[in-house]
Amino acid sequence: MTKSSVDLFNELGTSDILVGVSPPIIIADRLRTPENMGLILRLAGNINALNTLFISEEGHKFKKHKIIKTSSGAVTKVNWKIIKPNELIDLIPDDYEIVAIETSQDANNIFSVKFPKKIAFIIGNEVHGISQEVLSLAKKKVYIPIPGPVSSLNVSHALSIALFEWLNQIAY
């Protein structure tokens, strides 16, 4: 009988990787689609995020079934909420460092940055990036080097790379 991926991951002890690790916080600034919200919630479940915060004036208008479908059920398994920008700073513990995933002049290559153990990652809008108001809260900014002719990533893909680079640094 073929084993499911869940059975294989249980045998590999992948959930043990997070023992003693402070879970990350995910902050998404002004996402434009419910599909990206769902994908980010799925990532939050993959990494056992402490909280996932969606800064949005429009997010409550998204069709819930699209969020639920792309989250693969994570919508009910992770802590998340839609907030206004002025609420953000009160929801980040003082001992967490905010790191923005953003291509900018003052950003560093993600693979040359030492990440803190307690981290809150910010990702931005698919067209306009992270707002200046939210970006100003970040202690560090990192970019993901893209060697191909298409120089951008979907926000959920960028977040995946960042989350698992962080996990690689602190857990292995």
Image (spheres, helix red, strand yellow):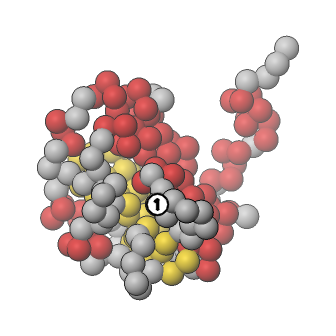
Farthest residue to the top: give it: 1
Q: Which residue is mark 1?
A: 152
Q: Quadrant of the C terminus?
A: bottom right
Above/below status of 9 relative to 103: above
Query: Is residue 16 shown left or right of residue 11?
Result: left
Q: Is residue 22 in sight in this rendering? A: no
Q: Is residue 138 above or below residue 149?
A: below
Check the image and name the residue furthest to the bottom. Answer: 106
Residue drawn 48% across the image and 74% down it: 142
**Quadrant of residue 117 in the image?**
bottom right
Residue 41 % position (x, y): 42, 42
Which quadrant is home to the N terminus?
top right
Q: Is residue 66 visible?
A: yes
Residue drawn at point x = 39 percent, y = 78 percent: 104
Relative placement, left or right, of 167 versus 60 is right
**Which residue is at the front of the view, 89 or 84?**
84
Label tally = 1
SS assignment at label 1 = loop
Q: Position of residue 112 (x, y in %)?
A: 61, 80
Q: Nearer the viewer, residue 102 or 59?
A: 102
